[in-house]
């Protein structure tokens, strides 16, 4: 178990004016979740109910979190986006926290995850929405923009590879070594035992020790994540994102994905211990209308480590 923790620490270290909000204070500094009105709603996804946190009024922005978080991953972005004139929709992704949790592994395939997002866009009442994703949320966002271009206004990706690029890069030792934990997560039962041992110590240490900006996650944040992961079946559901999708058959399908039509912004923390900077190479081939903003002193959890810079760049992109 000590070896596992040591290794884990090393590895996880074209729209029109209808969709443009009013121009306001983009930084929204001083705004916190406690200072704005949050609405907690249930929205029907692809055969399940999704818990969605909402704030603000205006064109919709849907924020998709990654592993092993939940809607709180975006707590520093929700007030800023709401203040900038957006309607912010932040789901607990399928299987996470208060959203529906199917027991079948294949219920976490990308087709179902993408269908959940499509249901959210349609529920906004707008013909399309801005889609923002981090980590697995970013992978889902990439796939959603490929499968449903008619539902996407603009696309923002935070430290999440396009699987077409990832499938090429993971063949090289530099990325293969960084990705070893993904192979571990494909095993049955053992990852659940390792991650939950000693009251989820490996997960706690990941949030406390791995970000380059110490204090990116408060004790309150970490306890909220652990509480959600401690629910029956929750950790298995989170791991099923890997098990249901990182297969040879799925990677072959991704090879035939079409270029993303939406204007796309990729924000990347250069110190990501799990995803190498080379995953940005060749992205213009899969997203021709691409902008890339690199943050030199941030790692994987970029929206928590550099929230002011992320908010400024993202809101400028979505507003202009």
Image: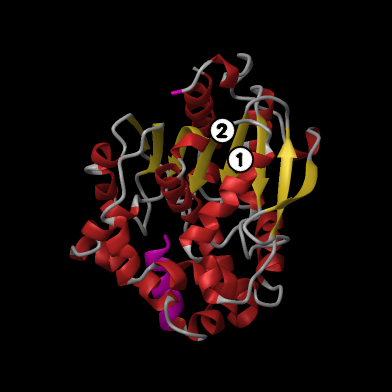
Secondary structure character of the magenta stretch overall: helix
Q: Position of residue 273 (x, y in %)?
A: 36, 57
Is 247 drawn above or below residue 256 in the view shown? below
Residue 58 colored magenta?
A: no
Answer left or right for 234 relative to 257.
Answer: right
Q: Nearer the viewer, residue 306 or 231?
A: 231
Residue 121 shows which numbered tag? Answer: 1
Answer left or right for 177 relative to 12.
Answer: left
Q: Position of residue 109 (x, y in %)?
A: 48, 65
Is 277 drawn above or below residue 156 in the view shown? below
**Residue at the outermost left position:** 172
SS assignment at label 1: helix
Q: Nearer the viewer, residue 254 or 127?
A: 127
Which residue corresponds to the image point at 23% horizontal and 57% vertical from the top-left?
169
Give the mark nearest the N terminus, 2 or 1. Answer: 1
Q: Position of residue 129 (x, y in %)?
A: 57, 33
What residue range appears in magenta?
3-14
């Amino acid at each position: 178990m000590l070896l596992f923790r040591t290794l884990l620490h090393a590895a996880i270290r074209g729209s029109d004016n209808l969709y443009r909000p009013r121009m306001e204070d983009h930084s929204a500094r001083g705004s916190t979740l406690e200072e704005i009105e949050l609405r907690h709603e249930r929205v029907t996804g692809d055969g399940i109910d999704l818990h969605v946190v909402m704030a603000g009024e205006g064109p919709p922005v849907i924020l998709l979190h990654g592993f092993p978080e939940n809607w709180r991953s975006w707590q520093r972005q929700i007030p800023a986006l709401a203040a900038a004139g957006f309607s912010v929709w932040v789901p607990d992704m399928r299987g996470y926290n208060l959203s529906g949790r199917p027991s079948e592994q294949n219920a976490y395939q990308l087709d179902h995850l993408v269908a959940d997002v499509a249901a959210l866009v349609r529920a906004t009442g707008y013909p399309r929405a801005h889609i923002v994703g981090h980590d697995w949320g970013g992978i889902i966002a990439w796939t959603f923009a490929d499968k449903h271009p008619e539902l996407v206004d603009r696309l923002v990706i935070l430290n999440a590879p396009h699987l077409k690029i990832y499938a090429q890069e993971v063949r090289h030792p530099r990325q293969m070594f960084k990705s070893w934990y993904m192979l571990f997560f494909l095993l049955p039962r053992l990852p659940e035992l390792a991650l939950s041992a000693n009251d989820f110590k490996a997960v706690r240490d990941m949030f406390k020790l791995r970000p380059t900006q110490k204090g990116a996650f408060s004790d309150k944040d970490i306890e909220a994540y652990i509480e959600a992961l401690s629910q029956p079946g929750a950790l298995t559901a989170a791991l099923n994102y890997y098990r249901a999708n990182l297969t040879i058959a799925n990677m072959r399908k991704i090879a035939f994905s079409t270029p993303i039509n939406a204007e796309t912004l990729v924000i990347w923390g250069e110190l990501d211990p799990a995803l190498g900077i080379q995953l940005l190479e060749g992205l213009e081939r899969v997203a021709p209308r691409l902008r890339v903003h690199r943050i030199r002193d941030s790692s994987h959890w970029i929206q928590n480590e550099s929230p002011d810079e992320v908010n400024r760049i993202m809101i400028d992109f979505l507003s202009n």
